[in-house]
Image: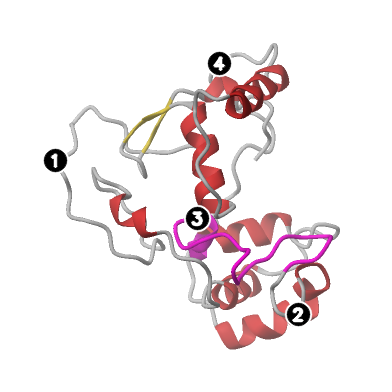
Amino acid sequence: MPWVGSYARFPQYRARSGKVDLLEDRINDCFERSMNGKRLDPTGRDVRDIVAYFAFLSNGIPVGIEMEGQGIPRLAAMRGDASRGRSVFASTCARCHGASGQGTALAPPVWGRGSYNTGAGMARINTAASFIHALMPIDRAQRLSPQQAFDVASYINTRPRPDFPRKVHDWPRGGKPPDADYHVLPLASAPSTNQPQGEKQ
């Protein structure tokens, strides 16, 4: 999760895009999916400034080093219950994210027009549950059990949110995770035997 060291981890093969992404690609991925915004010109000043900031944060960090806090421990998959998750959301999450998931001055929307869209990593139940369990609530992290995290992730991700039509092009070389609960186009070609299939965040 830290941005420190992120500059030293790119270029990076990402299974979801099926190619080697530049840091500029990853930045735009966040703008388009997690923020449900518009893609920026990868050669424009805004993206150059963001990349320069990441480079500053990564100054002195060796290429490829694992940083403390990098990634989130993945919970073992389990079935979430959206009805139970609604109660967890009301008692634990609504104070920051709003009773209707609309967001507040403290935290962003988790569903509705202003939330992340269907192509975002957080739209995947296991990803959302792992994030919630490790880091939420922000002031009392790891308060929820794994089951509660899956319940509230299931509730949140069954609420309406913007679509991301281009998600059908994800994982073009295969390897779509089970919790990516959407249709993708058939494989464009068989994956190379020496092509890495993993993806680091």
- Counting every numbered tag in the picture gives 4
The reply to whether the C-beta atoms of the residues labelled 1 and 3 are less than 8 Å apart is no
Query: In what element is the residue under mark 3?
Result: loop
Dot 2 or dot 4, earlier in sequence: 4
The span from disc 1 to disc 3 (Cα, nearest Å) is 25 Å
Dot 2 or dot 3, earlier in sequence: 2
Q: Is residue 195 left or right of residue 2?
A: left
The reply to whether the C-beta atoms of the residues labelled 1 and 2 are less than 8 Å apart is no
Q: How is the image coloured?
A: secondary structure
Magenta-drawn stretch contains 109: yes
Dot 1 or dot 2, earlier in sequence: 2
Pinpoint residue 109: horizontal percent, then vertical percent. 68, 65
Dot 1 or dot 3, earlier in sequence: 3
The span from disc 2 to disc 3 (Cα, nearest Å) is 22 Å
- State the mark number for residue 120: 3
Residue 52 visible at all: yes
Query: In what element is the residue under mark 4?
Result: loop
- Check disc 1: other Cα within 10 Å, few if <14, some if 14-19, many if 20+: few
Pinpoint residue 38: horizontal percent, then vertical percent. 52, 47
Pinpoint residue 1: horizontal percent, then vertical percent. 65, 40
Q: Is residue 149 above or below residue 20?
A: below
* Dominant SS in magenta: loop
Q: Which residue is nearer to you in this view: 129 or 185?
A: 185
The span from disc 2 to disc 4 (Cα, nearest Å) is 43 Å
- State the mark number for residue 99: 2
Dot 1 or dot 4, earlier in sequence: 4
- Check disc 4: other Cα within 10 Å, few if <14, some if 14-19, many if 20+: few
Q: Which residues are magenta?
A: 103-126
Q: Which residue is mark 1?
A: 190
**Residue at the (29%, 49%) spot, across then down:** 175
Q: Which residue is mark 4?
A: 63
Q: Amino acid at mark 2?
A: Ala
